[in-house]
Amino acid sequence: MECTVSWTGNTGARSGMGFVAETGSGHILNMDGAPDAVKPENGGQNLAARPMELLLAGTGGCTAYDVVLILKRGRLDVRGCSVKISSERAETDPKVFTKINLHFTVTGKAIAANAIERAIKMSHDKYCSASIMLGKTAEITTSFEQIEA
């Protein structure tokens, strides 16, 4: 797997902190930093997601993918799955994630709560590379709710 990240350079009157990533699979995504009121030249323009937000988004995609796949392989009638991720970071550099909660909302027809719980646990313990990696620095907790379709 590979990815190329390039600084977008000067963008108008001030130098920005925007970046464009091109993934090995040929997809493009933009990143930007937060504006810096003290040193505007060091800040972004708030035109795209922050890199650390994308790390959380990737983790959410990885684990939601697992949960849906596990439920579908169990021949369960899953019709929707979302995961809301909340996190805390260290106060000093490197500002790693220290706590992450993954709250799943699974919609389906007649899916037992223990099947959802099992799918989340399997993703968390065995399959989701992103959350397992982040678990080296962060305490990761999970929760879920189910909605009957």
Image (spheres, rainbow, N blue to C red):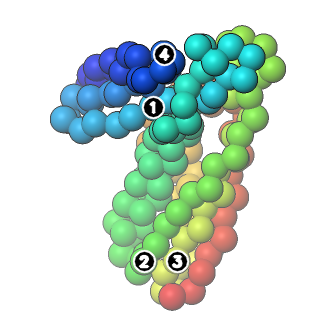
Secondary structure of residue under mark 3: strand
Residue ID at (33%, 27%): 21
Instruction: Calculate the distance from the C-alpha at mark 4 to the C-alpha at mark 1.
Output: 15 Å
Q: Where in the figure is residue 47, as x and y percent of width and height?
A: 49, 38
**Which amino acid, by three-letter code, is at mark 1?**
Met
Alpha-carbon neighbours of circle 3 within 10 Å: few (<14), some, or many (≥20)? some
Circle 2 residues within 10 Å: few <14, some 14–19, many ≥20: some
Q: Nearer the viewer, mark 2 or mark 4?
A: 4
Q: Earlier in the sequence, mark 4 or mark 1?
A: 4
Q: Are marks 3 and 2 in contact (CB under 8 Å)?
A: yes
Identify the mark nearer the N-term, 3 or 2: 2
**Which residue sits furthest left?**
26
Q: Residue at x 39, y 34 (%)?
A: 30
Mark 4 in CB contact with mark 1 (< 8 angstroms): no
Q: Earlier in the sequence, mark 3 or mark 4?
A: 4
- Percent x, y of residue 126: 48, 41
Judging by the rendered image, the residue that carries numbered circle 1 is 31
Determine the secondary structure under disc 2. strand
Separation (CA) of disc 3 from disc 2 = 5 Å
Which mark identifies residue 15?
4
